[in-house]
Image: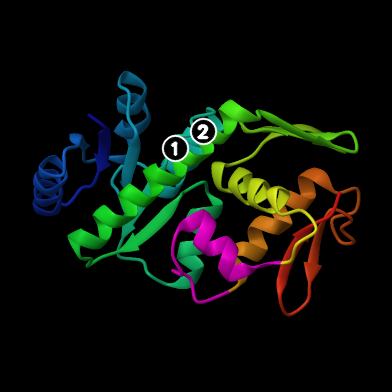
Amino acid sequence: MRSILLVEDDRHLAEGLTLNLEAEGFSVVHVNRGDQTVEEFERGLFDLILLDIMLPGVDGLSVCRQLRGKGHTVPILFITARDQTEHKVEGLLAGGDDYIAKPFDTRELLARIHGILRRNAWLAAQRAQENRFAFDGRWIDFSTLEAHGPNGNTRLSRKECMIVKYLVQRQGEVVSRDQLLDAVWGYHAFPTNRTVDNFILRIRKVFEDDPGNPRYFQTVHGVGYRFVR
């Protein structure tokens, strides 16, 4: 049985979500404060965290950054009333995997949860086949999410790894932003190109000698991106 850590301070919403998630076959542990989240997570084995942003103690974005800073790669789906595009991008760049705004349909939430877990399983299956991809003295390890570039070693987010893998598997091909959104997030949720663009900028800072003049992760203006070895 897959386990979900639910971090939500609205008691009625948390009770309803718990009932629906358990009916879907998940086990659920609920905490209502941000400053309890990391400790609770490290006590158990969780497959996913549903994380509100506006929380007492510590806000959800800070919780996400703490977990990522400790090297935890558990998928995180933000639940929040903040639905502006800049807030969505902020959550993703903090290390979140997805974002759903209140009020939401429970069926949509469940679809997103299953999509995240399915894509996470895809990445894990790929890891077993080919853990490391190397090019021109640079490398990325899909089992540890570690990478090496001109500035030394660093750790990528799972979404950054997914983008790199998708582009690498299609090296030389032009891949549109919509293709990347669909492959990495599973749906066209963001009405702006900024989501993908911000992630590409972060990837370039890891692998390119000159991120402003990229050699490997190239922009095809008006279309999207391509990886050229």
Q: Which of the labelled discs sits on residue 125, or is there none?
A: 2
The answer to whether residue 145 is magenta is: no
Whether residue 52 appears in this view of the structure is no
Q: Amino acid at mark 2?
A: Ala
Tell me, what colour scheme is on the image? rainbow
Label 1 sits on residue: 121
Instruction: Choose top left, top right, bottom left or bottom right for residue 74.
Output: top left
Instruction: Choose top left, top right, bottom left or bottom right for residue 54.
Output: bottom left
- Percent from the top left, x then y, of residue 59? 38, 47
Few, some or many residues within 10 Å of mark 1 (<14, 14–19, 20+): few
Q: Is residue 158 above or below residue 105?
A: above
Residue contact at pointers 1 and 2, CB within 8 angstroms: yes
Task: Please tell me which residue lies in front, 151 or 217.
Answer: 217
Q: Which of the labelled discs sits on residue 24, or is there none?
A: none
The answer to whether residue 184 is magenta is: yes
- Percent from the top left, x then y, of residue 36? 30, 32
Name of the residue lying farthest toward the top: 43
* 223 with respect to 229 (left or right): left
Q: Is residue 154 above or below residue 58?
A: above
Whether residue 68 appears in this view of the structure is yes
* 207 with respect to 178 (left or right): right
What is the secondary structure assignment of the residue under circle 1? helix
* 29 with respect to 140 (left or right): left
Query: Which span of residues is magenta-colored?
Result: 175-192
Q: Is residue 26 above or below residue 44?
A: below
